[in-house]
Amino acid sequence: MSQIELEPLTQGDAPEARKGRRSRTSVFWLSVPLVVIAALVFILPITGLLPEGGQDLSNTRLPPAFLDGGTWAHPLGTDKRGQDILTQLVTSGRLTIMIGLVGALVAIGPGVLIGLVAGYFRGWADKVISILIDAQLALPFILIALAIISNRGSSLPILFLVLALTGWAACARVTRSTTMAIRERQFVLGLRAVGASEARIVFRHVLPNLAGTIVALGTLQVGTAILVESALSFLGLGVVPPKSSWGSMLASGQDELSQAWWIAFFPGLAITVLVLLVNLLGDALLTHHDPRKRRR
Amino acid sequence: MNAPSLNAALPDEPPDGPPKAQAAKKPPSMAAGRVRRVAARLGTLFASLFIALTMAFALGRLSGDPTANILGPTAPPDQREALRQQLGLDRPLLTQYFDYIKGVFTGDLGESLQFYQSNTTMIFDRVPYTLQLVAGGMAVAILIGVPLGVLAATREGTWWDRAASTVALLGQSVPVFWLGMMFVVLFAVKLGWLPAGQSGTPKHLILPALTMSLYPMAHIARLTRASMSEALGEPFIDSARARGISRARVVWRHAFKNALMPVLTIVVLQTGILLSGAVAIEYVYSWPGLGQLALQAVQFRDFPLVQAIVVFGAVVFVCLNLIVDVIHSVVDPRVR
């Protein structure tokens, strides 16, 4: 009898460990291209390898090098002022990545804190916060963004305000439910029994247990922030000239679609690749930190 | 039982009346529970609506003087004062708030600064266009998203699953308006098959609706996969298979029926988001819907109109949430 009971245990354990290792390697291999993109965007402008970025009115709307009429002097072509697309792409990428990272932080920070309070302390605070979360999720984000921007104009601080206001609720909801599960665990009871203060339990013990979920949420939020930024900048409501991001490059390509589609094509492709990689990484991190999903 | 008694500690056993009376009372008490649950849900929804309305109000007023933004920083003070009076901003904040709430419930959302028309009329003039787009987009999203999700779930872990999941993730990673622009380049400029923008004929609807369908399609596919994969792991599926029921029947009649609820929920909620959130897509295709109106309002800093559209979006969203609850209670006997 004991042998029959032992068998499923060993059989069930081995693939699980293997899958855990596999999710760790997939996390690693997904972060490699992201690191490469970030390195390219931040290092390439210093090396001087990029084509000249200034205006060149004798070479306007040059197609990319792989099409008829393109030259390798401008590998991805030029825009209506003769500015090199590749150079613009690399220099605008810095602001795009920065907005993605900061935009995720400003949403995750308050979201996690609020969710932590609601999930750990429950009671009336939880009721109020839950209603607030519902209300926030009941408003389509683009409308909130439009309302704020129509009132305050567009600037980077306003963009971050919009990203924070539209992103905190989803983070708070996940943090709240995860915290509610953790607070029921034995070690929290033990900590209470030895007289640890609530603040200590929350920040030194519950929060570290949330770290994996928070990192995964934050990663997915980076993708969301980049997409929101690109949509707003495309509408002329996010990053506006003289500052430039991939979203604002799309805006300048919109008028040129019929004559020079590549002006809008490459920044859009860059956004898609970056956000896809970020989302894949976020999914892998979620799976890695959620043993329930890993078993599947 | 007004008088407190020892028996109060045992609520299951009423001190007076025989057990028969208790049995007879049971159905109404269940109905009362249902009424209480519906009331609680309605209360939460109304609270959400009020918070959303208050937020829309606060966004318009508390963040500084809107007249400076509308007229520009160099406008003379007497002009600003006149506009403030015209907008009713010179009145106490609380009066403004109550008038605003009253307006929302009587359908009066104020007058636009740039069109000199009732905001309500203008919104309802645009809604049919957006509705066409959303209906077309959602239809495509459901027709592709649901089978894709079911395909991935029934072949979990295989190449099919990975391909379907990647397609779905791609749909959530691409800026859809950019894809719309590329559709215009390919199908309108290069191939000349379809018109690039404006509205009118069914042909005009194809590209915008296709673009619109992408994000909800990805969302629906991912959710269907997760929900189906959970349903397929339930013991009743094994029992259905053991009884020799055909595979297709098990998948669609047994598993899918149980996986349907979250998918239906997301369909309705996504509809709400699309109804007011399709600004960039409508802009790409010069589609004369609500999103374009919102964009015009922002560009002109027409804050009464922006606020009216936000209110409209919130009301639509709350109504759709209510519909979800009703569907829940009709489809799922456990909620009833």
Image (cartoon, coloured by chain):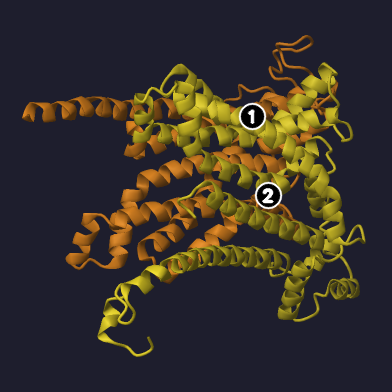
Chain colours: A orange, B yellow
Q: Quadrant of the C terminus of chain A?
A: top left
Task: Report the quarter where the N terminus of chain A lies.
Answer: top left
| Gap in angstroms between the C-alphas marked 1 and 2 | 26 Å
Q: Residue furthest bottom?
A: B3
Label 1 marks which chain's residue? B
**Disc 2 residue type?**
Ile
Query: Of residues B133 and A133, which is closer to you in this image?
Result: B133
Q: Position of residue A77 (x, y in %)?
A: 74, 20
Taking the spot 75% from the left edge, 67% from the top edge, the residue there is B104
Q: Compared with residue A75, is residue B177 higher up or lower down, i.e. above or below?
A: below
Q: Position of residue B320 (x, y in %)?
A: 64, 52
- In front of the other: A12 or B231: B231
Image coords of residue A75 (percent x, y): 68, 17
Q: Nearer the viewer, mark 1 or mark 2?
A: 1
Residue type for callout 1 = Leu
| Rendered location of residue B234, percent (x, y) | 37, 35
Residue drawn at the location 45% of the way across and 22% of the way down: B247
A136 vs A23, left or right, is right
Residue hosting label 2? A142
> Around disc 2, counting alpha carbons within 10 Å, would you say few (fewer than 14), some (14 to 19), or many (20 or more)?
many
Q: Residue furthest top?
A: A68
> Could you say which quadrant of the image residue B101 lies in?
bottom right
A165 vs B84: above or below = above
Q: Is residue A241 visible?
A: no
Q: Is residue A239 above or below residue A85?
A: below
Left or right of B235? Residue A12 is: left
Question: Is any atom of residue A102 visible in this view?
Answer: yes
Q: Chain of mark 2?
A: A
Q: Would you name the residue on which mark 1 appears?
A: B143
Where disc 2 sits, the SS reads helix
